[in-house]
């Protein structure tokens, strides 16, 4: 009887489902988590969306602090807090001075177009859909030499420009681009000012990805794509020097490093 009671206490003390986290705990890193169904999750006190089955995703920005606190409250009230150590990345900062002003600032007639493009991209990033299509993790959409890395920044005539918020993979024009994970095509645009033919995938729970400078796009908005499905081809549309894919990933408004999500090429 005493043994049975002790066993019962052990069973009660055991988590219904252990919290699982997989990913890279580094600035720009993406982490996929699984808690129990119905769990509530927060990161540094801010609520994180959780799918019906307990899957969730979190990410750490380019300049994330060295610690983050993840708190999970299961439906039975049990709460687990984990302090996550976030490793630093070293970013390439390039200062270029003495440039003619017109090379640094877009022409007034282009500014309205750039704003409209950014608004469309921002709307997709602000959308929260419930299906956790990211759970497979991410694969490289194109393989090739990296011609641009996440987080690098140029300071032109003393003015810091936005850090590079994705990776650039050099590949011949026409190389097929494959969806790195399943999702819903959330944006198809034929000609954005900077990024040319541009498309976005919504992977669920605020995680989106963007593909820029494409030669062609072979999917339509609202279409569900599976991991590995061809979504278009590499090009150099928009402001690009040479054929490459710019691939970006964003969790809500936090840009992540796709290289950390996809791993070794
Ligand atoms: Zn790029």
Image: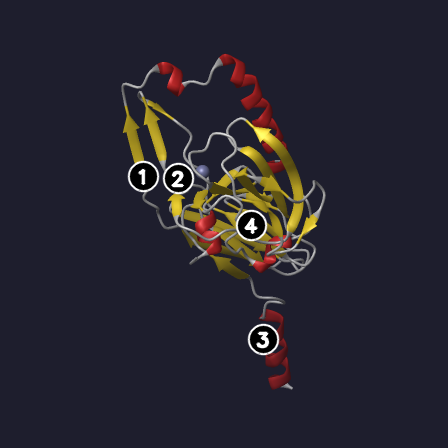
Q: Nearer the viewer, mark 3 or mark 4?
A: 4
Q: Nearer the viewer, mark 2 or mark 4?
A: 4
Q: Looking at the picture, does residue 258 appear above or below residue 227? A: above
Residue 176: mark in rendering: 4
Mark 1 residue crowding within 10 angstroms, few (<14) / some (14–19) / many (20+): few
Ranked by sequence position, the earlier of labels 2 and 4 is 2
Q: Looking at the picture, does residue 136 appear above or below residue 8? A: above
Q: Looking at the picture, does residue 162 appear above or below residue 33? A: above
Helix, strand or loop status at disc 1 = loop
Helix, strand or loop status at disc 3 = helix
From the image, tell me which residue sits under label 3.
10
From the image, tell me which residue sits under label 2.
151
Where residue 155 appears, as percent x and y from the top left, is 33, 27
The C terminus - image quarter: bottom left
From the image, tell me which residue sits under label 1.
92
Q: Quadrant of residue 33?
A: bottom right
In which of the image's four quarters is ligand 1 placed? Answer: top left
User: Residues under labels 2 and 3: Cα distance?
Assistant: 47 Å
Q: Is residue 205 visible?
A: no
Dots 3, 1 in contact, CB < 8 A: no
């Amino acid at each position: 009887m005493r043994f049975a009671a002790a066993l019962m206490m052990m069973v009660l003390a055991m988590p219904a489902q252990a919290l699982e986290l997989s990913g890279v705990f580094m600035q720009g890193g993406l982490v996929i988590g699984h808690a129990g169904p119905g769990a509530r999750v927060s990161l540094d006190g801010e609520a994180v969306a959780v799918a019906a089955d307990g899957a969730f995703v979190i990410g750490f920005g380019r300049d994330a602090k060295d610690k983050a606190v993840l708190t999970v409250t299961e439906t039975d009230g049990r709460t687990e807090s984990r302090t996550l150590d976030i490793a630093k990345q070293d970013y390439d900062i390039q200062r270029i001075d003495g440039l003619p002003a017109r090379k640094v600032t877009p022409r007034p007639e282009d500014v309205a177009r750039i704003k409209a493009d950014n608004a469309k991209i921002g709307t997709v990033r602000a959308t929260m859909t419930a299906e956790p299509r990211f759970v497979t993790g991410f694969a490289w959409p194109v393989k090739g030499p990296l011609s641009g890395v996440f987080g690098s920044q140029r300071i032109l005539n003393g003015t810091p420009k936005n850090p590079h918020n994705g990776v650039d993979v050099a590949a011949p024009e026409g190389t097929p681009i494959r969806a790195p994970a399943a999702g819903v095509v959330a944006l198809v645009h034929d000609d954005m000012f900077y990024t040319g033919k541009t498309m976005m995938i919504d992977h669920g729970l605020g995680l989106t990805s963007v593909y820029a400078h494409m030669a062609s796009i072979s999917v339509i908005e609202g279409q569900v794509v599976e991991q590995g499905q061809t979504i278009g081809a590499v090009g150099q549309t928009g402001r690009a020097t040479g054929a490459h894919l710019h691939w970006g990933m964003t969790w809500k408004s936090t840009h992540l490093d796709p290289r950390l999500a996809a791993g070794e090429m």
